[in-house]
Image (cartoon, rainbow, N blue to C red):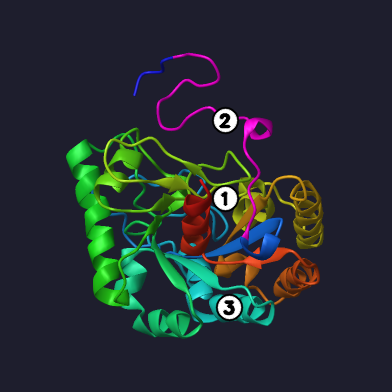
Amino acid sequence: MPANRKYGMDHPHHSWSPLPSRTCLRWPNGANLAICIIINLEHEQWEIPPNSYVASNLAGGLSPRPWPDYMRITHREYGHRVGVFRVLAALEKANIPPTIAIDSATARMYPYLIKYCRDKGAEFIAHGTSVNSMVTSRMSYRTETKYIRETMDALIEFTGETPRGWLGPEFGESEHTPQILGELGFRYVCDWPNDEQPYMMTVPTGEISSLPIMLELDDVNAMWDRKITVKNYAKMLIDAFDRMYLDGLDNGRLLVLNLHPWLIGQPFRIGYLEKALAHVRSKKGVWAATGSEIIEWYREQS
């Protein structure tokens, strides 16, 4: 979509809204901070699907190798086989309900994980078809609509739930994505990391809210891409929480963490996550919720 530069914005997908200009947001029971944790369950296909786009910096393994790249594929599969159970246990210990971003390939091939996550009280949100099939502007409107609808239908079939949230693989979107999500009945999207509160997207059909992920606290972005040590990553989590908790005294804040079990679920990292979550849960005035719970509460207050 061509840029249309005007005051504060250069696109039509949401309104310009500086935080000091907003009315005060309060979470249930007067909490000043809401926390949501998204666990990514994403399958990397051995062969790239025809006409698919793959991020050039896709994390995992050592470096891209000729097919079949067993190092990268099995490194990421560790999350499905081992890591996710550690992460879910850490969330359960901290009494934080998981929001599971799951792609259609994982939903189809790992029924054990579906049942396990459901038993932990998880919400499932749609996460594309696989991590090596991103949404991009190379897709036509019709192709992207078909892609998102097929993802949605697969989750309905294999989880028994209609997904209300969407997180694009590798945060991929096109200029049509919000409109398509609105047309298909989604309630929120997690691809826009530009705020510390939910906000409404502008779509011609439906009602879509943004649930903004804290991108710099995404474990892949921090520890894999930027090479931050896990010890410093845990400190970042605690420092971010402490500041947002303080700021939330005046106007409620939202902390959305995006975690990948193949990375944070490693035995030498999980303890740092547990310590950070214990710090979060030691404070009063923190509401831990799923993505849908947060968005529906926000809608009622707006």
For image coordinates 62% across by 82% down, the residue present is 89
Dot 3 alpha-carbon crowd within 10 angstroms: few under 14, some 14 to 19, many 20 or more: many
Residue 213, label in figure: 1
On screen, residue 50 above or below 7:
below
Q: Name the amino acid, label 1.
A: Ile
What is the span of residues highlighted in magenta in the rendered image? 5-27
Q: Earlier in the sequence, mark 3 or mark 2?
A: 2
Q: Name the amino acid, label 2.
A: Ser
Q: Is residue 25 magenta?
A: yes
Q: Quadrant of the N terminus?
A: top left
Front residue of this view, candidates 219 and 278: 278
Q: Position of residue 207 (x, y in %)?
A: 35, 46
Q: Is residue 258 left or right of residue 276?
A: left
Which of label 3 and label 2 is nearer to you?
2
Contact (CB < 8 A) between labels 3 and 2?
Answer: no
Q: Secondary structure at mark 2?
A: loop
Residue 88, label in figure: 3
Q: Earlier in the sequence, mark 1 or mark 2?
A: 2
Q: Name the amino acid, label 3.
A: Leu
In space, the residues marked 1 and 2 are separated at their CA atoms by 17 Å
Q: Position of residue 172 (x, y in %)?
A: 41, 44
Which of label 1 and label 2 is nearer to you?
2
Q: Position of residue 215 (x, y in %)?
A: 61, 47
Q: Position of residue 56 (x, y in %)?
A: 47, 43
Query: Do we see residue 52 in this rendering?
Result: no
Q: Is residue 266 left or right of residue 158?
A: right
> In the rendered image, which residue does mark 2 sit on?
17
On screen, residue 242 above or below 172:
below
Residue 53, label in figure: none
